[in-house]
Image (cartoon, coloured by chain):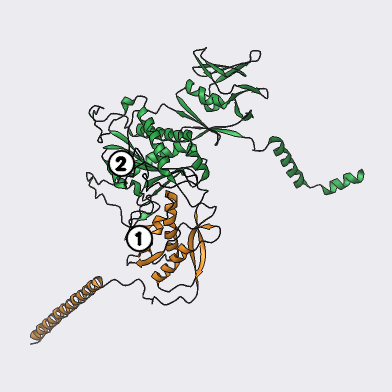
Amino acid sequence: MSKIRKIIHSRLIVTWGITLVTIVIGLAIVLLLIANSKRTVIQDAPPELPNQANPTDMLPSPKDVNIYLLESDGLELTPVRLELRLYAEPTEQLKQILSALVQTTPTNYRNPIPRGTVLNEVYIDTQKTAYLDFSHHLADGQIGGTTAEYMSVTSILRTVFDALPENIKHVQILIDGKEVETLAGHLNISQPLRF
Amino acid sequence: MQYNIKMCLRTFDPIKLFLFIILLVSATHGFSDAETVRFVNGEGDILDEVEFILHDNNIYLPVETLKSVFDPEMKHSYHTPSKQLTIKTKDKEIKLLMGNPSVTIDAGRQTITLTVPPRIIKGEQKLPISFFEVVLPELDDVRVIYKPELQRVRIMQNTSLPSDSSEINPLWTVIIDPGHGGEDDVGCKSQTGLFEKDVVLSVAKEIETLCKQHGFSIYLTREEDVKKSRQQRFQIANRFETGLYISLHCNASFSQNHKGLRLYLNNPYGSLRFRTAPIPTLGIKNLNIRTQANFLQQSKDFASILQKELNFFAKDPIAISEFPVISLKDVYMPAVLIELGYLSNLEDAARLTNQDHIRELAQTIVRSIQVYSAKVGHTIKSNGATAEESSNPIER
């Protein structure tokens, strides 16, 4: 009798054991599926906007920003510090800084951006590429020469990367909303650029 | 008197005395104010820096200069009564008379007349700089160029260059691209009204003449003042099987201080970089993707030859810049853009109106083409090709 009990007892242990293992494996599979499905959901979700700040929010205090210009007797672009009251949102900040670049020429400096150039619009995509749309003056006002064209482009790039190093990794210059191959026939700006 | 000596001893300052001696020595020896002429070889290495004497606005150098810059085994002797200077190199004998511009080589076999005679100055025999320019090429297979504004003399060996034009591969073509052109595209302009399109065309024509003289096949993307699109220029270049593409431009800057020559290479991943990654080769050797990037190394090789040769025109080394250059983008052969000078700089603009300077620039560029051509072996006929078999892809 005790032998039969022992057998029943051991069978019970085996049955329970198998049941438990099955439950654990089942749970693991379910959890894995949930995890995978979540990942898929994340992939399919629309990309997050780079910044959720309200475009009209201003930073609490003025900020120092550098715009890159050429000293009258200099050979290289040098930073000129400006104190600006900036919006909190990066795209808005960029508009403010680039507008300052095209409009500011202190005494004893030369601005490599041709006179009359206007910043039409700025876009920053999810890959941290800034698309900067300038008026046709940026191309039409070029004085010719590789050095001058390189300076115009690098003045914009340096100013952008200096101001927003975390938010922008590449810059593409557009003219009146369109991609262009070059500003003056030397430097290829048909794709997003970085240093 | 005793009082004075005591005062002097009391006020004696050894530092002041030391400074006084230094000043005295520097004043008597002229410190390093002495003017010198720098001799360099074909590679731009300094051979010697020699102090010169200015006499009637002409530069005179010691006879010993020949030893350090030309022939270390050179010997010379001077016969005072006849005022005759005899110079013996390894295989030639040169005779000069002080105050006489005639130079006799190998007992009258050859006579050269200098613009300025050799002279006795401060008791020593001195040679005018024209002696080095004119006589040395007669003694050895060298070219000598003197740049007065840089006080530099360059002595180049001619031996590495093809001497016979029949050795040059007729399929290998030099394509010269004079930038801009036409009424709408004058390029940059100088304050004096000089247009880039005209300067580059005149240099291109000069290069064309010299290349033809040296037996090179050459083609210009424009022969006159006409507008040519970038695509048209690329198409012209890519019709040739093999060659070298040189785009000629003049520079401009917002700073009038920018001056000199500059070289540019099309590298989409240079100092300015595109976002997209370079095309992977995937290990397939035969996959012939035609891009300018495939020729980057050869373009670099040619640019460094140009840099060495053109450095002779500049006080500072000529820069080679690499970034995405649109005017070389779709050329499927080694390609370099040369900015010949800044039209925004008065000095450069004046030089680029000077026909002698233009000729010198063209000569230096052609010399670079010769050196590159010899280096990469395009001077040897390949696959048994002959001038008759090869036909120019473009009817001229």
Q: Is residue A18 visible?
A: yes
> What's the residue type where badge 1 is placed?
Leu
Residue A173 image-quadrant placement: bottom left
Task: Give x and y (percent) for residue A123.
Answer: 35, 67
Residue depicted at 76% across the width and 46% down the height: B16
Task: Say left or right for B65 vs B309.
Answer: right
Q: Chain B is drawn in which colour?
A: green
Tell me the subunit letter for badge 2: B
Residue depicted at 43% across the width and 60% down the height: A156
Residue B100 image-quadrant placement: top right
Which quadrant of the rendered structure holds the N terminus of chain A? Answer: bottom left
Tell me the subunit letter for badge 1: A
Q: Judge whether A179 appears above or below A47 on screen.
A: above
Residue at the extreme front of the image, as rendered: B183
Q: Mark 2 points at which residue?
A: B333
Q: Residue A174 carries which label?
A: 1
Out of B387 and B227, give the one closest to the viewer: B227
Task: Give x and y (percent) for residue A31.
Answer: 21, 76
Label 2: few (<14), some (14–19) or many (≥20) C-alpha neighbours in 10 Å:
many
Mark 2 and 1 residues: CB-CB less than 8 Å, in contact?
no
Task: Give x and y (percent) for residue B259.
Answer: 50, 45
Out of B184 and B339, give the one closest to the viewer: B184
Residue B227 image-quadrant placement: top left
Out of A3 and A135, give the one closest to the viewer: A135
Q: Judge whether A174 appears above or below B299 on screen.
A: below
Label 2 secondary element: loop
Q: Which chain is orange?
A: A
